Amino acid sequence: MPPISVVTCRTMIIAAAFTIGLNACTPVVDTTPPRTEAGETPPNPATPTSLQVAGEDFNERSRKRSAPPKVEPVVHNGVRYVVLRGAKGRGLPQNGGYIEATDQATGKELQLIRVYEVVYDKDVEDDKRDVYIIGMRLDAARDRLLIENERGRRFAVHLKDQKVVVLRP
């Protein structure tokens, strides 16, 4: 296969960057020496291996978000409260923001509580739009769960009537 010219490479990289919505693109030109007579390309540690976009490594920018931290279940009066992840897989409108209440003895689901609504921004990648619960603890004196999400918002879920109240920061 004939080698592709630097101009063709730059055009392809810039077109790809704009296709995915990036507006500042600096292509990195491969400076690897030509193959030897044996057909091998000697390694060159100084050769860039990724596209630089707006001063950042494109591979770094395009990585998926890290998983939210695991939240330990809370058990109170025979009911186990668990943070539900991947709620869309159950046909719900959002992935985060749900607490599942199950009977501790039987494992039967008693209730599904939506703590908050996630408004999805169509201009943001799917996996980065979700807002998950990162903390949950029992306030036994007031018979409620205290919840915190990734955006730092705090909520109280009253366990008698499942009423959700937004708490002040």
Image (cartoon, rainbow, N blue to C red):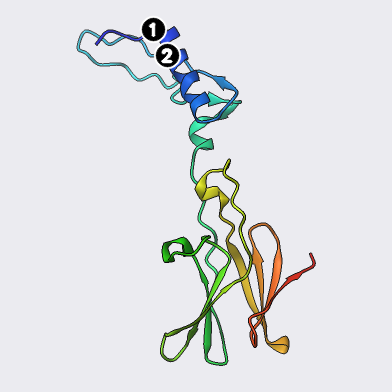
Q: Is residue 109 left or right of residue 140?
A: left
Q: Which mark is residue 9?
A: 2
Q: Amino acid at mark 2?
A: Cys
With 61 as the anchor, is 35 left or right in this view? left
The residue under the point 43% across, 66% down is 90
- Any part of residue 51 in sight: no
Q: Quadrant of residue 39?
A: top left
- Residue beneath the point at 80% across and 67% down: 168
Helix, strand or loop for disc 1:
loop
Residue 77, quarter of the rendered image: bottom right
Q: Residue at x 72, y 89 (%)?
A: 141
| Image x and y of residue 59, in percent | 48, 34
The quarter of the picture where the N terminus appears is: top left
Q: Which residue is mark 1?
A: 5
Label 2 close to label 1 by CB (< 8 Å): yes
**95 with respect to 108 (left or right):** right
Q: Amino acid at mark 1?
A: Ser
Q: Is residue 112 above or below residue 140?
A: above
Question: Residue 147 location in percent, x, y?
Answer: 65, 71
